[in-house]
Structure formats: C-alpha cells, structure tokens
Amino acid sequence: MTRKLMILFTFFSSLMVLDGGFAQNTYNWPLKPFQQQHFINGTFCENRPSGGELRHHFHNGIDIPLSQGGEVYSVSTGVITTIDPTGTNSYIRIGRFAYVHVDPNPALQVGDQVLAYNTVIGTTNSQNHIHFIDGYYNNETNPLLPNRIDPFTDTYNPVIFSIRFYQNQTSVQFSDNRVGGLVDIVVHAMEKTDNGRLGENNGVYRAGYQIFSEDGVTPIGDPVENFIFTNKPGNQYIKNVYFEGSNLSTYIYIPTNFFDMDGYWNTKTIPFGNYQVEVFVEDTRGNISRKRTSVVVVEQDITPPPAPILSAVRIIDYRQLQISWQPSSAEDLLGYRLYFSFDGLNWNIHKNEFDLTPADSILDISNFTVRNPIYFKITAIDNAPIPNESFSSVYYGLRSNQETPRFLLVNAYGDEFFIEIVKTYSEDIIATGTYRFDSCNRRAFQNVFADLFDYDMIFYFFGDDTSSLSNEEKIRLKSYLQTGGNLMISGSQIATSFFNSDSSFYKEYFKIIADGSLSNVDTIYGTGGQIWSNEIIAVGENSPLPFVNGIRGIDGAEVLVEAQGKTVGVIFRGDFAGGSSPGSIIFLGFPFESISGFSQRADLLRTVFAELSLVTGAKITGRADVPVNKFRISSFPNPFNLYNSSGSDLMTIQYELTASRNLEVDIYNLLGQRIRRLFTGRVSRGIHNLTWDGTNEKNYIVPYGVYFIVLRSDNLQSVQKFLILNSSDYF
C-alpha cells in the first residue's frame, strides 16, 4: 500500500464505524460531497403502508434524495455481505450499513472489500433516493442521532397540527373535549429537517404528554414520554404508535401507548373538573414543540337514551317520501340516526345525528325513486363524551309503485318491541303482486296522518296485544268502511277486549260477537263455500298458539275459518250502517302472521285480493289446489348479491327428493312471471344441486328484488323465496 493511500485510509477510518461494532463514531454522507449536509425525505421510524394496509411497518432508515443514476458510496470500509440487484428494492450491504433502492455496481460481488468514500458501490434506481439503513435487520438504529451521520444540522421546530381524545383502544372520539374513563391522546405532528422538497413533512423523534391543572401551572403528575425512536420497534407494534388516518405522509401518534402494549390516560385517578393537556414532540437535535388544549374530565355516561318511536313511513305525493317519529325524551339528546334496509337484515345509515337534530320529528325525502320494498328504523344519540346510541325503534317500510292497489299496514302490537310483523306482512303482500304499501303505528293512524281513502285495503294487526281501539281509531275505521274500504284485522285476544269496552261498535262495524277463547291451537280449517275453503292452516311456528279468540259472525258475516269446533274468522261483504258504498271486513281471532310458512300466507292473501278484485299480478302457480312445500329446498347465498366484490356470481339451489320424479325448476318474479327455467327432466331420489347466474331467458341480468324458486312435480310443489341485492346507494 502506498503512503498516500495509507494516509487516506487512516483519515477515513477515524470517521467511520468498523464492521461488527456499534461505537458512536460519526460517518459522512453516502454521496458526494461527503462532508456536506444533504436533504432528508424520510426520517427513522415513520409510518409506512404496504399494499392496502396504511399502517404496516416502521421506516427502518432515512431517505436521502438522489436522482436515478446517482453514485452511491459506502460510509464504512468493510466487506460486502449481501447484494440484491432485483426490483426497485435492490440493495447492497457492507457490514452494518445497507443502501436500498440502489442498483449494485456490477463489478462488485459478495466478499469484496470496499473503501469508505472511495468505491462506487452502486447507483440509485427509479426511486430517486437512497434508503440508508444503520444496523442489521430488526436491530436498526436512528442515523440522525448525534454522533451518527455528519454533518447534520436541524434548526427547525416540529409542528403539532391537532390534539384529539378517544375512548381507549377505539376510534370513538370524545366530543367537545369532555373526557372520562381510560383515554387515548392522539396527536397529528410532523418534523421539518431542512428546506428540501420533502424535508418539511417527516416523522418526529420523541412524542409525549403531560397533564396540568386548569390554570396551566400546576402539573398533575410527571411528563410521559413513551415514544423515543432511537431503535426501531418490531413492526407488529406499528398500530400502537400510529393512529387511524396515518399513511405515507401523515403521522398521527398515540403518545399514551407504549411501543409494545396499550396505554392510556386514566382520568379515574383525578377529580372531575377542568384540566390542560400538553403534548410535546421533539427532533434529534433537541428542537421541541408544545401544544396545549383544555379538557373537562367528567363522569362516564354509558347509559343510552330512550329510543324514539318510529311512527310512519309513507309516500305523501309522487316521489315524495315522508318518515315521522316521536322524539326521544332524553335531556342530553344530540340527535337521531335513520337507517334503511332492503331486506331487514343489512342496514345502512341514511341520516346521522348531525342531520337530524332534537327538534326534528319529520323527514321529507324528495325525488324518491326506489321501487322495491324499503324499510327504515331510527335510534337516538346522546351528547355524552362518548355518545351512546339507543336501542332501535320498530322498523316500518313501504313500496312505491305507480300501480294500484295500495295498502296500509298498521302495527297495533306495540312500539316497544323490535318485531318484524310489518316486514312479514309486506313480504306476504308483495309476493302476490306489484302492490304498493305504507306502514305506521296506531298513534299515527289515529292522528289522521293520511287520507284513508287513498288505500284500497288496511291491515290492522294486534298480535297478542289485549288493548281495544281508541275513539279516534273507531271514527276513522267506521268512516273508511262506510265509504267502501276493505279491512283485515287480526289478533289472538282482541275480540274479548273489544267487547269488554264497546260491544255495540264491534257488532255494527266488525260484524262479530265474542265467543270465548281457545288454547293450544296448532291447526285452523277453512270452511266450505268460502275463499279459504278446504284449507288446512298450520299456526304457531314452533309451538301451538296459547290463545285464540272464538267469535260469531252476525248480520250476514260468513264463517271463514274454524278451530276446535269454533269459528275463529269471519268475512263480511256489503253495506255498513250509514255507509254510501259496500265495503268488506275480515276479522281473525288469531294473528295472521302466526300462520306457518311464507308461501301459505301469500296464497291465502292472494285469494283475498282476488275475491276483493285487488289482483295485479299472476299467481306463481296456476292451480289453487296444488299442495305446496312438499320438497326440501334451500338456496345460498341468500340474499344473493350479483355485484359483490368476492368474485362469486352464482347462486346454488339445493333440493331433496324422497323418490324419483319428473321435475321442473323455475325462477319467478313478484309478478308471478316465470323469468328462467333452470331444469326439466327426470331426477333420482336424493339431494341435488343447481346453480343460477342471475340471468333471465335472454341472458340479461335480472333487477334486484324478491324472487322465488319453484319446484313442481305432478301435483306437488315447493316454493323458496330469495332476495337479490344491489349495493348501490339509491337516494
């Protein structure tokens, strides 16, 4: 070795860290000029995304901008231990230092000796920067610390943008800085290292907080400084450090956490009252920024407000939807959340508590174009530090079509129960044709919420409720029947309740007399000569009905159904006292919704509508005497989403035969129209599967909505309802 080269080697060795050690010797920059500060595009332990995950790993080095093709030098004399020339993450490692996004010098190979600041170890690739790492994998250290990369001067204070407070380990934010319980302090901050293009948006070195009394002078405990980025934590802890919303260039810290575990500010240890929270962030050169915000520590409120009562959902004019509710009685009410669903299972928020204030009780929606059934429910939200949401109201629904008839569903069962009776009735009704319907509770009905003459038929369902009709309800129903209206009213204990309150009204307009009660009823029989003649009707889904009212029809009311030798349902068609047009009433001493099986309820309603000339669509089956539900049949997925992101675009239909049969399998829509024949032929005994891709006979995708799978064999038939969803936003 020449004397000149020996002197250079000795000089650079005094500046470098030799292989295998972590002595705090300084080193220069890995690009020319070596002893001049360069810009920094990214600092140590910044958040880094990967793929679709925004918080994936810690940045394990610093980024130094250098255009593609720029020469890169080693900061240490040593042996090349790794070379990887592939892709944009190509790199070369000499001892403890790695140089990433660098295309290695093709003249070099593993085992070669390189001299610090002498050998060109590679050139930058298309990433246009050196990702410089000080340390071995999972043992990296911060190159910007004192006694590391040199020269490096930073005179800029970090910047704190915001301080927010969240319930510990959640994304639920405390409102108005009123906090309680276990609190996460969340701070959005960044560090400016230089005046480079990206030098003012880097991650910080330290982050912490301290609590002060209301006057801001007296500290409540010592400063808490859990985050100091000297060495890189394990990537599994990235979400302990960075809060939701962090990404490649946004750094939102949770200084109440530890690197490796959850932490929090425990407000339970201090009295309720006003405090100041100070957050501080610092860089590697001791530049520090502090920001304070006032908070109020309050008692935790975990009690939800009373639920509002949804009153009515109706179309009041062409394409004008109105939703009304009774307000919640909560004194700390913030507002309401209104949800909608097309199937009663999957719910989406349409309006939130900032849209619907405590003063609101009616929502009008213009240009309403949904033609499929849609359901709504509402909840109340209080103004607690962590807002509480009430239980949901009963949900109501409607269907808006230009076709008639139009029906009104009145829930007389009660507002305090989350029941699906409205949905049950609506599905039964729409299965028989393209009917419109609105729905409401009794209070809305008796408050003259709509003109009853807009409705071709009213369904009043009491379930097992024992209450009687109010005077307002009697007046409205009397007027409706006198002017040619059609009413169906059902309930297991209403006949007795009615007669205990006002027997004369029910005799004159409902055409009945109470005739005792029945118990443990599981089958009801249609009587000869009437619309449900020869029907055998199973009631009670899992057990017999404990109560059924016996009744006797008067003034020409005819027996409709019987149970245990007593009449339990009548139908009257004709003029009512003081009336101007003939109307009709069907009175059932049991809940209609208790009839087992969707198909049977739909078939029974279909015969009612045909008798009352309210038919709009064809029947699914052309024969009223074909027995139904004689085969086991199922479909999945149900609901069937033709537009999902999972890639699945087939529905599987499974059925079971107990003997070999000639079989037809068809898909029908709500109009009773066959839209696709899936199979016809001889099928052996056992379980069989078919698939359907959601297209009609012309191979067009069918619209979203309710459909039916119909299996027919000779004089036997089974029907399975399913729903096709569309994930679009409809209003």
Image (cartoon, rainbow, N blue to C red):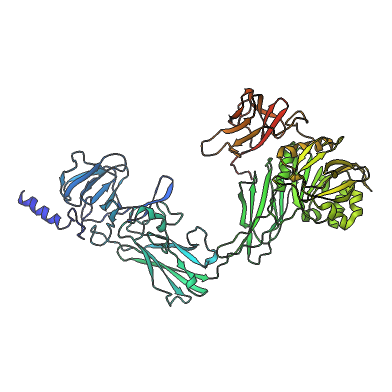
Residue 37 in which image quadrant: bottom left
Q: Which of 526 and 439 is in front in this view?
A: 526
Q: Position of residue 428 (x, y in %)?
A: 73, 40
The answer to whether one can see residue 215 in this image is yes
**Across the whole image, how many numbered discs are drawn on residues?**
0
Q: Position of residue 633 (x, y in %)?
A: 64, 34
Look at 64% across and 53% down and name the residue there. Answer: 338
Horizontal arrangement in the rendering, residue 659 relative to residue 615 (left or right): left
Q: Position of residue 535 (x, y in %)?
A: 79, 36
Look at 21% across and 41% down and name the residue there. Answer: 105
Q: Extreme top residue here?
A: 681
Horizontal arrangement in the rendering, residue 415 relative to residue 688 (left or right): right
Horizontal arrangement in the rendering, residue 253 relative to residue 370 (left or right): left
Residue 669 lies, with reference to residue 49, above or below; the image says: above
Q: Nearer the viewer, residue 574 or 254?
A: 574
The answer to whether one can see residue 400 in this image is no
Q: Where is residue 230 in the image (x, y as percent from the top left)?
A: 30, 60
- The C terminus sits in image quarter: top right
Q: Which of 362 and 626 is in front in this view?
A: 626
